[in-house]
Amino acid sequence: MSMTLLSPVTLGDLTLKNRCVMAPLTRCRAGAGNVPTDLMAEYYRQRATAGLIISEASQILPEGQGYPSTPGMHSAEQVAGWRKVTAAVHEAGGLMVLQLWHVGRVSHSSFQPGHARPVAPSALAIAGEGRTADFGKAPYETPRALETAEIPGIVQAYADAASRALDAGFDGVEIHAANGYLIDQFLRDGTNHRTDAYGGSLENRLRFLREITEAVTARVGAGRVGVRISPLQPANGMFDSDPQTTFRAVVHMLDGFGLAYLHVAGMGSDQPGAAGPAFALDSLRGLWSGRWMVNYRYTRETAEVALTEGRADAVAFGVPFIANPDLVARFARGAELNTADPASFYGGGAAGYTDYPFLPD
């Protein structure tokens, strides 16, 4: 039986051999200097049958790091390390984009140059504990609110990282505007209490993402840029008083750029604890004229339904790709999936990373 999931699709300048996308997955296995390793190259090479691989989130600046051993895209050594990864993926017939990341307040002074406080739109701390540079835990610190004059430098850093990504052999980039990290912190009124041009009105709260998207698309071309949003995801203390209005405006604004795709991730409206009044994420679909990617606990069956009903053009899978490097083949055959080991998700070596079994052919 033919499956839409296994059919090709064009996302901007990228032609995918199937609609099964590997979602961005933090694994905390970068080497010294947050440089990608040969083990990472093998991990991604194993999964190159995906129509598209979206890399693990990679900080655009040292200040953008919030978890141990996450790769960066701000040094020559990191570019060289990533070049080995993209070469391995391309040799295996795959496509790969780099996810551009700044965690904002989801950090700790142990990651920051000079052990400074993390930065954010506003000086509002997350409740609870976060990670420290030694894989420990500590209460989240109250971040320092960015000065207005600092923001253009961060926008520039996104564009610079996008240029480095193409230099490193990536086929494009994804701007990470989801999951409670810096861009998301600017978008939502629960975390953005600014009174300058980047806060207050909805138009002002969208300004940071708009400027980043302008800068990145100017560098690498809109057809090689995707954006990820998560309108209802409460992770990292996120909340918005009216997420439907906020993210309708986000989608409308981004639609004017002619991007390769919009990646709508995170919780569905039926999930408890949504970050504001829940709404049907499908209601945003009609506002978007380009390719629409979805991601949240999809299975082979539910992904196929979403595609055939026109609710998505591609589906990103996270945990299934961790445990099944040959996920596409397993979907094609209706084969049983390996079970993921959550204890090995973050940090470590090959165990739980490159040693999951393939189908026996």
Image (cartoon, rainbow, N blue to C red):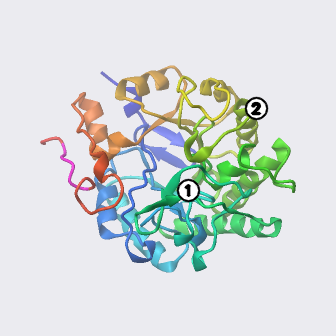
| Residue 7: x %, y % from top left | 40, 33
Front in this rendered view, residue 5 or 116: 116
Say left or right for 225 vs 215.
left
In this figure, which residue is indicated by the disc labeled 1?
173
| Residue 122: x %, y % from top left | 74, 56
Labels 2 and 1 touching (C-beta < 8 A): no
Q: Secondary structure at mark 1?
A: strand
Q: Is residue 356 magenta?
A: yes
State the residue at coordinates (48%, 26%).
307
**Would you identify the image quadrant in which residue 51 lies?**
top left
Question: What type is the residue that disc 2 sits on?
Answer: Thr
In this figure, which residue is indicated by the disc labeled 2?
245
Q: Which residues are magenta?
A: 354-358
Of callouts 2 and 1, which one flags the residue occurring earlier in the amino acid sequence?
1
Q: Which quarter of the rendering shows the N terminus?
A: top left
Residue 291 position (above or below residue 31): above
Does residue 260 appear in the picture of this structure? no
